[in-house]
């Protein structure tokens, strides 16, 4: 099982070269020098609206997005200018408990960002304090490429949903308690961190008779909204949302979580 974004990443560059050979053939008179062809192919591959599945946003540094909400708005502190927007009653409040300011979400409210998703390598994390009552399949993060759910219809654990498939992490966010949830993809696997410690690797079960085993998944991180635009957001508080344009690991994840809160759980 692979996602459509991963398939695009694997095949797009090869398809460029294959297509050029189909058009030009082997005649020297029709061939194009690589130095001339490569930038044209890259521009075409990355910029055709509605066709490209490239999910690598531009960034000036390692942080792609950094929202701490301390200025009372969704201001991007990464230096990239990817400011977010509060929608449908989402509001910044004084959260206390070492978190300073945080955003209060209801089932109908959400935060939007200017970005859609990010493909590996990346790391995404946030603090969450869910209220006791949540709708089924309540959304933590969402984009056109998939969703990160606080639970699914059959389990209370955090779940990835992409391309119509669900991937259960076995991690449960306790109600009325601050928890840090993060995930990171490095090109071979997607690791999931709970309270800054890696607790799971996203897997799927290969049902082929000659396989019959769990295999790792590379998830595309949905970062277009915190909560859901369709009225099924997580109900509670969120704080310290960040996106790195590289993978991250346990020791660093603890540092990143601490950066957005004065008290660890």
Image (cartoon, rainbow, N blue to C red):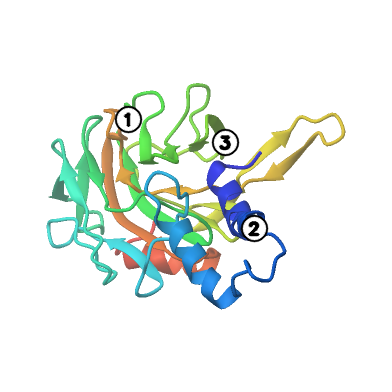
Residue nearest the observer in this picture, 36 or 138: 36
Residue 92 is situated, as x and y percent measured from the top left of the image, at 15, 49
Could you classify mark 1 by the number of other residues whose Cα lies within 10 Å: few (under 14), some (14-19), or many (20 or more)?
few
Q: Position of residue 182 (x, y in %)?
A: 46, 53
Residue 96's place in the image compared with 3, above or below, is below
Q: Is residue 108 above or below residue 52?
A: above
**From this viewpoint, is residue 178 visible?**
no
Left or right for 234, reference 197: left
Which of these two is toward me, 155 or 218?
Answer: 218
Residue wearing tag 2? 14
| Res 180 visible | yes
Q: Secondary structure at mark 3?
A: strand
* Numbered tag placed on residue 246 in the rendering: none
Mark pair 3, 2: CA separation:
29 Å
- Total marks drawn? 3
Q: Position of residue 152 (x, y in %)?
A: 47, 27
Furthest-bottom residue in this view: 35
- Give the spatial CA distance, label 1 vs label 2: 49 Å
Q: Position of residue 58 (x, y in %)?
A: 37, 66
Question: Which corner quadrant of the image does residue 9 belong to?
Answer: bottom right
- The residue at 26%/28% (across/down) is 231
Spatial CA distance of label 1 from label 3 is: 23 Å
- What's the residue at 32%, 26% (across, down)? 133
Task: Tell me the residue that label 1 is attached to.
Answer: 132
Q: Earlier in the sequence, mark 1 or mark 2?
A: 2
Point out the frontmost of discs 1 and 2.
Answer: 2
Residue at disc 1, secondary structure: loop
């Amino acid at each position: 099982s692979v996602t459509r974004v991963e398939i695009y990443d694997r095949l797009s560059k090869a398809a460029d070269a294959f297509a050029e050979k189909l058009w030009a053939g082997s005649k020297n008179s029709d061939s194009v020098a690589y130095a001339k062809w490569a930038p044209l192919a890259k521009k075409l591959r990355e910029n055709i609206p509605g066709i490209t599945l490239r999910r690598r946003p531009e960034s000036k540094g390692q942080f792609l997005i950094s929202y701490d909400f301390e200025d009372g708005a969704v201001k991007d502190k990464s230096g990239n200018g990817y400011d977010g927007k509060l929608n449908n009653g989402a509001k910044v409040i004084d959260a206390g408990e070492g978190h300073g300011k945080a955003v209060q979400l209801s089932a109908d409210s959400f935060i939007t960002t200017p970005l859609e998703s990010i493909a590996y390598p990346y790391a995404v994390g946030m603090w969450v304090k869910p209220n006791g009552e949540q709708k089924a399949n309540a959304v933590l993060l969402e984009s056109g490429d998939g969703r990160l759910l606080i639970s699914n219809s059959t389990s209370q654990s955090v779940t990835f949903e992409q391309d119509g498939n669900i991937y259960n992490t076995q991690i449960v966010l306790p109600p009325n308690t601050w928890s840090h949830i993060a995930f990171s993809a490095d090109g071979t696997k997607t690791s999931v961190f709970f309270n800054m410690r890696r607790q799971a690797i996203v897997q799927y079960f290969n049902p082929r008779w000659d396989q019959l085993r769990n295999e790792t998944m590379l998830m595309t991180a949905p970062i277009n909204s915190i909560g859901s635009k369709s009225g099924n957001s997580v109900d509670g508080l969120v704080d310290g949302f960040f996106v790195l344009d590289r993978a991250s690991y346990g020791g660093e994840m603890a540092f990143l979580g601490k950066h957005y809160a004065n008290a660890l759980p």
